[in-house]
């Protein structure tokens, strides 16, 4: 199961790997790439199937395969940072290959994305609607998702415009990859496994996030009591875009304390 996973490497020092979310690519980290590359050797990866990382032909598009392909592309040991769907991938990597992960940071992510009894999350009908619309107009569907994840940001329109520019600078993911990604967001449940994470674990949320409600933070804390968390007060689903300065301060402090 070998595939070429695209990455952009900058800086030097401890390896820091950043994983983007559903529908996007490594360009999403542009606002924070320079300061993070001054913190260590930054690897901006296009997840398999996204951007310039083609999904291997004939390989089923599953969460376990996505995790394996991503793990194979990582440096020997790294500070692993995952946003949204990328946070789900990063969490699973930390669970199954902890020797490869010096620290784990998840951003606007959840061990289980759908809303359920006593569990804040994305309403299942929203994910179902996106899946239904994908086959009709997948580019417009991705644009709608971008608008939803920017809701609550003080400068949502500017955020969406900039993200669309970064997104369309690289090849779009296929409908099949996007559909499988939505299925991962709807079905992967790592809640019961969080107690097994025995390495530095930091969770960052946006108070105004319409996709991963900040109210889930305390419930995740109960599942992973050794982890730490920060809720960014003026941010929605992409804190590194809404407030890059605060994001870099928080992540830099965590990584520096665990290097």
Image (spheres, helix red, strand yellow):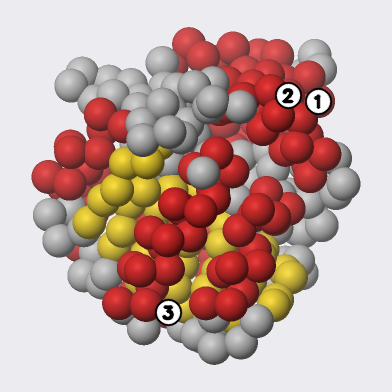
Q: Name the residue under label 3.
A: 100
Q: What element carries label 1?
A: helix
Quadrant in which residue 158 is drawn: top right
Q: Name the residue under label 1.
A: 139
State whether residue 192 is above or below residue 180: below
Mark 1 vs 3, N-terminal side? 3
Asked whether disc 2 touches disc 3, contact meaning CB atoms under 8 Å apart, the reply is no
Horizontal and vertical percent position of residue 248? 48, 60
Q: What quarter of the picture does the N terminus occupy?
A: bottom right
Quadrant in which residue 227 is drawn: bottom left
Quadrant in which residue 140 is drawn: top right
State whether residue 18 is above or below residue 128: below
User: Residue, x 42% and y 79% (percent of image)?
Assistant: 100
Q: How far apart are marks 2 and 3 (CA)?
A: 34 Å
User: Residue, x 67% and y 49% (percent of image)?
Assistant: 28
Q: Distance between the residues labelled 1 and 2?
A: 6 Å
Number of other residues with Cα within 10 Å of mark 1, as a class: few under 14, some 14 to 19, many 20 or more? some
Q: Which of marks 1 and 2 is in front?
A: 2
User: Does residue 138 appear in the picture of this structure?
Assistant: no
Q: What element carries label 2?
A: helix
Q: How far apart are marks 1 and 3 (CA)?
A: 35 Å
* Mark identifier at residue 143: 2
Number of other residues with Cα within 10 Å of mark 3, as a class: few under 14, some 14 to 19, many 20 or more? some
User: Residue, x 44% and y 52% (percent of image)?
Assistant: 246
Horizontal and vertical percent position of residue 238? 53, 40
Give left or right: position of 130 versus 237. Answer: right
Number of other residues with Cα within 10 Å of mark 2, as a class: few under 14, some 14 to 19, many 20 or more? some
User: Does residue 241 appear in the picture of this structure?
Assistant: yes
Give left or right: position of 161 versus 251. Answer: right
Asked whether disc 1 touches disc 2, contact meaning CB atoms under 8 Å apart, the reply is yes
Horizontal and vertical percent position of residue 80? 46, 67
């Amino acid at each position: 199961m070998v595939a070429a996973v695209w990455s952009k490497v900058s800086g030097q020092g401890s390896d820091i790997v950043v994983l983007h979310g559903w529908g996007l690519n490594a360009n999403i980290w542009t606002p924070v790439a320079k300061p993070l590359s001054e913190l260590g050797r930054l690897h901006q990866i296009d997840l398999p199937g996204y951007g310039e990382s083609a999904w291997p032909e004939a390989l089923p598009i599953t969460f376990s395969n996505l995790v394996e392909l991503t793990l194979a592309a990582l440096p020997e040991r790294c500070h692993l940072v995952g946003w949204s769907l990328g946070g789900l991938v990063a969490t699973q990597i930390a669970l199954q290959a902890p020797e490869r992960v010096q620290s784990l940071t998840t951003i606007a992510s959840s061990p289980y994305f759908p809303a359920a009894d006593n569990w804040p999350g994305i309403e299942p009908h929203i994910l179902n609607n996106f899946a239904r619309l994908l086959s009709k107009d997948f580019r417009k569907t991705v644009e709608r998702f971008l608008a939803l994840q920017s809701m609550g940001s003080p400068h949502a329109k500017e955020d969406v415009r900039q993200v669309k520019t970064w997104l369309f600078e690289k090849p779009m993911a296929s409908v099949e990859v996007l559909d499988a990604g939505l299925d991962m967001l709807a079905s992967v449940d790592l809640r019961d496994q969080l107690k097994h994470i025995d390495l530095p674990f930091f969770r960052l949320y946006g108070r105004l996030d319409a996709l991963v409600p900040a109210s889930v933070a305390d419930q995740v804390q109960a599942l992973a009591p050794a982890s730490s968390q920060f809720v960014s007060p003026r941010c929605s689903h992409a804190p590194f875009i809404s407030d890059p300065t605060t994001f870099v301060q928080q992540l830099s402090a965590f990584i520096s304390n665990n290097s």
